[in-house]
Image (tube, helix red, strand yellow):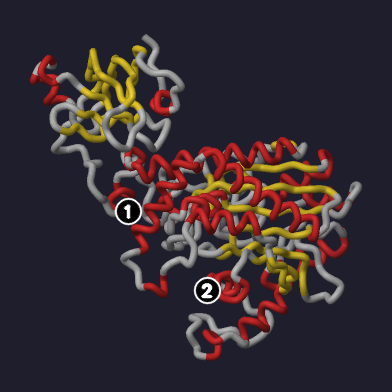
């Protein structure tokens, strides 16, 4: 008999028919009531066992974590809290779970404990909900761009280019580390390496995506990116996913419009598709915040915060205006900021971004026209010669969630910027070709997918919104 997903059973429009359900035991009470979950929904289905006619040896094997198959009648439930239940006529243990050793017992576990058991944490309500929301958000990303006529482009994971100029990249090599080939000058001879040159894991697919936008008009990438940044914080991962659209003929205003529309679309999509999971995550967040001082608690619930982003236009503020606001702010004057704002040109930190969003404007904020010397080489230089057509979107609780810009389409200006920053023209000859042959105004942005998942789920640590987090000193699983 083909089994039916728990989600479909709970949404059934008929009763009193025989069904087969398979899943994992969450709890087993009174030798009679199994709470069964198969991952299709946050909700369990209650399976009522006829314990008087079930062998004692079988009952002892119905433990938390065990995989079981039940056949029985789907009937209206007599108990509170569920619409339907299964009156079990046949039960089979598919896989035993040692009750004394299974780590995911039905009790509250710390998030740190769950990270240490990342292979099993998805069996908890919270992580099941987070991963279903993550999946729906990923689908929403593709749905949005596909409906808008964007072309999905798979950019390389192994690359010789450093899009950010950050230098914090994971090197890829097939050379024997205990016997490296050396040139006459005493340097490592990468010509003897697999690719014949120095290569790394990508930090961004942007540069390659730009080349495709200059032929296909509007493209997007959605794939893994890597940073060898030794940041052991709740906002950084060494391996994460990036969404990067690039659009020919779009200027910075078009770029801001696209980013705002995109974010609102994917949040609305997820609200519509994941009501049960988001309601659970909202309850979880409310419970977590009870232990915090009143001043540190969120002013809005999770669903209120998500709807707030949908209903409010993002406030657009120039970097220069933001600096004036921050310089004159109470935390700055009272030296409460860790990084004090004294002059124009400062690189904004998370504390400044969150102040602007959460305290001053109280809505999502798009900052634009940043100082050229704190932004990447490919951003279009403004007429003032000191700012670039860059934009960042700041969100409550997260800080920066999107970074983007109008790209520098003028060949001579781009060359000059690369010279100043010491970027090798020969390494990026192919990128410069897009400015030699049919250059045009174009723009794009990057959105760290995990930060979006953080915001939508209400979680506070980025390690809890990716299945197996990669962080400094941690490549377990």
- What is the number of callouts on the image? 2
Which residue is at a point 75% across and 70% down the rendered structure image?
A: 369
**Residue drawn at 38 percent across, 44 percent down:** 127
Where residue 386 sits: x, y (%)? 78, 76
Asked if residue 20 is positioned above or below residue 302 in the image, the reply reads above
Q: Nearer the viewer, residue 388 or 436?
A: 388
User: Which residue is the site of mark 2?
Assistant: 351
The tag on residue 449 is none
Q: Secondary structure at mark 1?
A: helix
Q: Looking at the image, which residue is at 44% across and 27% down? A: 11
Residue 147 lies in quadrant:
top right
Residue, disc 1 = 111
Q: Residue at image x 39%, y 26%?
A: 6
Give residue 106's position: percent from left, percent from top.
23, 42
User: Residue 168 versus residue 305: which sits nearer the camera?
Assistant: 305
Dots 1 and 2: beta carbons under 8 Å?
A: no
Front residue of this view, candidates 455 and 196: 455
- Quadrant for residue 392, please give it: bottom right
Which image quadrant is residue 125 in?
top left
Q: Mark 1 to mark 2: distance in Å? A: 24 Å
The residue closer to the viewer here, 330 or 425, is 330
Circle 1 residues within 10 Å: few <14, some 14–19, many ≥20: few
- Image position of 334 (left or right of 328): left
């Amino acid at each position: 008999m083909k089994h039916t997903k728990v989600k479909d059973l709970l949404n059934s429009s008929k009763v009193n028919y025989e069904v087969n359900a398979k899943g994992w035991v969450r709890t087993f009470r009174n030798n009679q009531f199994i709470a069964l979950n198969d991952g299709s929904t946050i909700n369990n289905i209650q399976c009522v066992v006829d314990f008087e006619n079930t062998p004692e040896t079988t009952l002892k094997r119905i433990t938390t974590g065990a995989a079981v198959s039940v056949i029985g009648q789907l009937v209206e439930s007599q108990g509170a809290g569920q619409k339907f239940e299964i009156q079990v006529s046949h039960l089979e243990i598919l896989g035993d779970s040692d009750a004394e050793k299974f780590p995911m017992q039905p009790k509250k576990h710390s998030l740190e404990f769950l990270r240490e058991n990342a292979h099993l944490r998805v069996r908890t309500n919270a992580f099941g909900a987070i991963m279903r929301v993550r999946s729906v958000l990923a689908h929403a990303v593709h749905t949005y761009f596909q409906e808008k006529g964007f072309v999905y482009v798979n950019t390389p994971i192994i690359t010789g280019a450093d899009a950010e100029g950050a230098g914090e990249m994971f090197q890829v090599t097939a050379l024997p580390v205990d016997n490296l080939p050396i040139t006459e000058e005493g340097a490592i001879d990468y010509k003897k390496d697999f690719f014949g040159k120095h290569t790394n894991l990508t930090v961004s697919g942007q540069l390659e995506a730009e080349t495709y936008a200059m032929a296909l008009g509007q493209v997007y990438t959605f794939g893994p990116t890597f940073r060898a940044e030794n940041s052991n914080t709740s906002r950084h991962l060494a391996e994460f996913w990036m969404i990067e659209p690039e659009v020919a003929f779009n200027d910075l205003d078009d770029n801001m419009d696209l980013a705002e529309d995109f974010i609102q679309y994917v949040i609305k999509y997820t609200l519509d598709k994941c009501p049960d999971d988001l309601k659970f995550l909202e309850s979880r967040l409310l419970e977590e915040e009870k232990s915090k001082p009143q001043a540190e608690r969120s002013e809005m619930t999770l669903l209120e915060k998500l709807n707030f982003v949908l209903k409010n236009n993002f406030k657009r503020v120039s970097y220069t205006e933001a600096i004036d606001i921050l310089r004159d702010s109470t935390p700055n004057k009272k030296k409460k900021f860790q990084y004090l704002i004294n002059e124009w040109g400062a690189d904004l930190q998370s504390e400044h971004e969150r102040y602007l969003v959460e305290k001053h404007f109280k809505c999502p904020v798009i900052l634009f026209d940043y100082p050229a010397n704190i932004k990447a080489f490919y951003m279009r230089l403004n007429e003032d010669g000191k700012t670039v057509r860059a934009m960042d979107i700041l969100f409550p609780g997260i800080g920066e969630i999107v970074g983007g810009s109008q790209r520098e389409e003028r060949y001579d200006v781009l060359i000059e910027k690369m010279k100043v920053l010491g970027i090798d023209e020969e390494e990026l000859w192919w990128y410069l070709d897009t400015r030699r042959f049919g250059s045009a105004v174009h723009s794009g942005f990057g959105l760290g997918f995990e930060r979006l998942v953080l915001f939508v789920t209400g979680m506070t640590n980025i390690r809890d919104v990716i299945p197996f987090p990669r962080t400094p000193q941690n490549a377990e699983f």
